[in-house]
Image: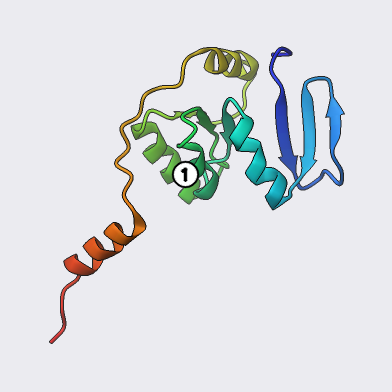
Amino acid sequence: IRQWKFEIFSRQARQVSEFANLRLLPVDKALFNRSPITCHGVICGAGFETPAEALYLDKIIAIPIRGQYEQICNAAALRRLDVTCLDSIHPDFPFVILRWLELPAPLRRIPFRPTREIVEAMFGAAPVNG
């Protein structure tokens, strides 16, 4: 996978370091927000915020954190949207990533709605106590 560059955000990184095609960065909101704009894809946990934002990029692999029920549920929902989800990092991981990087992004038909529309629909569906 040496022909691809990777940016890895880690709490253990104290400064930006580079090793061949890997760039290790400290967790920093500004750096993290810029990274997806120029990337080819996102490999992340199956939490909520990063996968939700990465869906706009179309190329995402989610790996739920073991033992975290919410992440397992999120991964199940992501799979229904044709997002590649891995249960763990296994010996074939580099080959899975290479194949994923070389394939075109899947076309997803996700019904995104403006926040205002969602809130109005929720309040309209709520029972009125009287």
Which residue is the extreme one toward the bottom?
A: 130
Q: How is the image coloured?
A: rainbow
- Whether residue 95 is situated above or below residue 47 in the rendered picture: above
Q: Residue at x 36, y 24 (%)?
A: 107
Q: Residue at x 44, y 38 (%)?
A: 75
- Whether residue 32 is situated above or below residue 108 in the rendered picture: below
Q: How many marks?
A: 1
Taking depth in this image into account, of 91 and 50 the one nearest to the observer is: 50
Q: Position of residue 2 (x, y in %)?
A: 74, 13
Work out which quarter of the rendered image holds the N terminus and state it: top right
Q: Position of residue 50 (x, y in %)?
A: 55, 44
Q: Position of residue 53 (x, y in %)?
A: 50, 43
Q: In the rendered image, which residue does mark 1 sit on? A: 52
- Whether residue 102 is situated above or below residue 116 in the rendered picture: above
- Decide if residue 106 is in sight here: yes
Tag 1: amino acid = Ala
Task: Kindly indicate the quadrant of the structure image that contains residue 73.
Answer: top left
Q: Is residue 128 left or right of residue 51?
A: left
Instruction: Assign a secondary structure to mark 1.
Output: helix
Work out which quarter of the rendered image holds the C terminus and state it: bottom left
Task: Kindly indicate the quadrant of the structure image that contains residue 120.
Answer: bottom left
- Decide if residue 68 is in sight here: no
Q: Residues within 10 Å of mark 1 (few under 14, many from 20)?
A: some
Q: Residue at x 60, y 13 (%)?
A: 95
- Whether residue 39 is situated above or below residue 116 in the rendered picture: above
Task: Kindly indicate the quadrant of the structure image that contains residue 82.
Answer: top left
Q: Position of residue 106 (x, y in %)?
A: 40, 22
Q: Is residue 70 left or right of residue 17?
A: left
